[in-house]
Amino acid sequence: MDSLALELIDEIIGHVDEKDGLSRFHLRTCSLVCRFWVPPSQRRLFHRIKLRHPLLTFRPRRAQIQQLDQVLLNSPHLANYIRVLRLPTMSDVSPFGDATGLDEPLPPLLRKLTQVQKLEIEALAWKDLSRDLRQSLCLVLELPSMTSVCLYSAQFNFMDDFMNFINHARSLTCLSLHEDAMWWMSHNPVALEDTQADDNKQLERCCISRLDMRFKYRNPASVSWLLGLRSHLDVSHIHTLHTCLSPEVKDDSFNRLLCAIGSSLKHLFISLPCPSW
């Protein structure tokens, strides 16, 4: 095995199907072949990390988050292999327990990550998070490698909170909002002041190429933010748009978004709500 070219080893390991339930077992086995197989096996093994809430683990004292944090502490180079990070539900309304269960183990882990390209969050209730956890999430968004953010479900009490959160992603090219319950109230005066302070820094515009906004009930405020001066996202280069249209929503936000995108749009996907019988 030592005589195999590194390109051939990468090709062999690349055939391990990530959709296979035993893929992680196979990758661990590959890492035991010889020392030349260790780096490519580790790159595939740590490429996508999906964390579960500590209260969902069978052994709370050895929860996945603490285990991974210890692994990265012992082998810091493994943090460079993590490119896709999926975080667990962080909400007080979650049936898996409140967000405080993540306040202690998650921030130290997030600060060790340096090359994450995509951040996925299952459910996020911004108001439920501690200040330390909020700052750690923002640091991940600020990574130069961060190009994609996906929120499956999110709650922001104020539109300004959402704006401040997403504006930390300075290299964003793909934004996905897949949720039934994203909502916010009117402008928060305190958050508004913070946002204006950020505006004074003249954030560099990010040209996003893919936008996914599948709201169950489309919120015109999200489009207004996206097209507004306080957003650092440039939609004129979007080539793929996925959205949801509902006959119950009477507004021109979709038309305004299409006009702003212009001729760069190449792929348009429209989802319709399922009829209730």
Image (cartoon, helix red, strand yellow):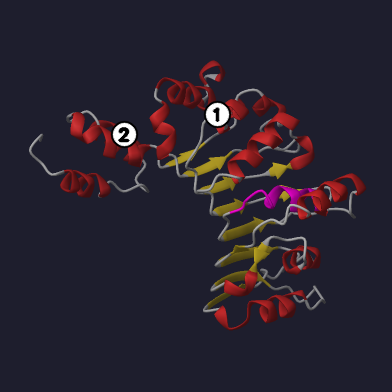
Residue 144 % position (x, y): 53, 48
Horizontal side of 178 relative to 16 (left or right) equals: right
Q: Which residue is mark 2?
A: 25
Q: Which residue is mark 1?
A: 109
Magenta stretch encompasses residue 134? no
Among all residues in the image, which is located at the extreme bottom? 263
Task: Kindly identify the amino acid type of the residue bearing the numbered disc 1.
Answer: Leu
Q: Is residue 221 above or below residue 79?
A: below
Task: Kindly identify the amino acid type of the residue bearing the numbered disc 2.
Answer: Phe
For image coordinates 56% across by 47% down, the residue present is 119
Residue 227 % position (x, y): 74, 69
Q: Quadrant of residue 269?
A: bottom right
Horizontal side of 19 relative to 107 (left or right) equals: left
Label 2 neighbour load within 10 Å: few <14, some 14-19, many 20+: few
Label 1 sits on a secondary structure element that is helix
Prevailing secondary structure of the magenta residues = helix
Q: Is residue 114 visible?
A: yes
Quadrant of the drawing holding the C terminus: bottom right
Q: Is residue 24 above or below residue 147?
A: above
Among all residues in the image, which is located at the extreme top? 61
Q: Is residue 142 above or below residue 104?
A: below
Among all residues in the image, which is located at the extreme front? 201
Residue 31 % position (x, y): 25, 31
Label 1 neighbour load within 10 Å: few <14, some 14-19, many 20+: some
For image coordinates 68% across by 52% down, the residue present is 166
Span shown in magenta: 160-170
- The answer to which of marks 1 and 2 sits earlier in the sequence is 2
